[in-house]
Amino acid sequence: MTARRDRGSRAGLDKAPADVAAMFDAVAGRYDLTNTLMSVGQDRGWRRATTAALGAGTGDKVLDVAAGTAVSTVPLTACGAFAVASDFSVGMLSAGASRDVPKVAADALALPFTDESFDAVTISFGLRNVSDVDAALAEFARVTRHDGRLVVCEFSRPVWSWFDRIYSEYLLRPLPWIADRVSSNPEAYRYLAESIRAWPDQRMLADRIGAAGWVDVGWRNLTFGIVALHRATRS
């Protein structure tokens, strides 16, 4: 008889920090590969769009929150910025050890930086995983200078109802099937599907960003709204 493979650990939708960190520690080893396969390579374009939206330049200090393996941080340094990768999953940061950027183990709700330390803050596919979204957005504002920038890249709601139905079907069936075969922690991708479906749409997230001390909030849809880039300025 073939032994049943361990499906791994996952967090619940209450986003208990210890559970989220353990889940990402367990998925770290094959995280980048799995994301590329599941997004059919779209993740690379989403990272390029995020870097462009942030508009970081030479000498800018940028904080990349929930940076994971720092795959999203490296392109920021290519723009001449001093970019710091922060994440509370030590396993994820360790998996990105070969990427030569500063790395800090940090909770998005209690960043270990002084007020107005950065010219810009960005977070890609991580805001959805914090236990208190509004507190995290306020914390990002705290460490950003006046007139500094925020870019949030996160899963969102497809703009066409027919495409939304197709996407929902993908989250329910093909995505878990792929995760079972390529991920080091398949259960994390069941959490992924559930957390995406529970996440607010573009307008609702923009309102929450504005309520946390950011102004000039706007967004741009990527891949028909599967992902949205929200950009804002520190008031």
Image (cartoon, helix red, strand yellow):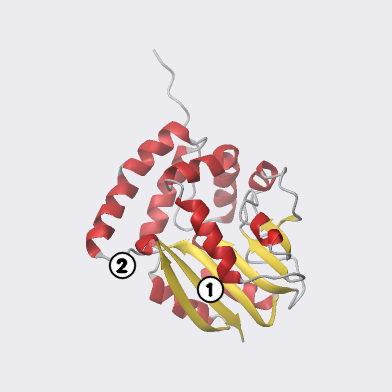
Q: Which residue is mark 2?
A: 159
Q: Secondary structure at mark 2?
A: loop
Q: What amino acid is found at the position of numbered circle 2 in the picture? A: Val
Residue beneath the point at 67% across and 55% down: 74
Residue extending furthest left?
Answer: 162
- Real-space Cα distance between discs 2 and 1? 25 Å
Residue 152, image x, y percentages: 53, 68
Disc number lying in front (2 or 1): 2
Residue 66, image x, y percentages: 61, 58
Instruction: Give residue 180's mark.
Output: none
Left or right: where does residue 142 sit relative to residue 31? right
Tell me, yes or no, if residue 215 can be seen here: yes
Dot 2: within a 10 Å radius of its alpha carbon, few (fewer than 14), some, or many (20 or more) residues? some
Residue 36, image x, y percentages: 49, 45
Residue beneath the point at 59% across and 42% down: 28
Dot 1: within a 10 Å radius of its alpha carbon, few (fewer than 14), some, or many (20 or more) residues? some
Out of 43 and 130, give the one closest to the viewer.
43
Residue 199, image x, y percentages: 40, 64
Out of 193 and 82, give the one closest to the viewer.
82
Instruction: Give residue 134's mark.
Output: 1
Left or right: where does residue 147 sit relative to residue 13? right
Q: Quadrant of the N terminus?
A: top left
Q: Quadrant of the C terminus?
A: bottom right
Residue beneath the point at 73% across and 78% down: 116
Left or right: where does residue 5 sit relative to residue 32? left
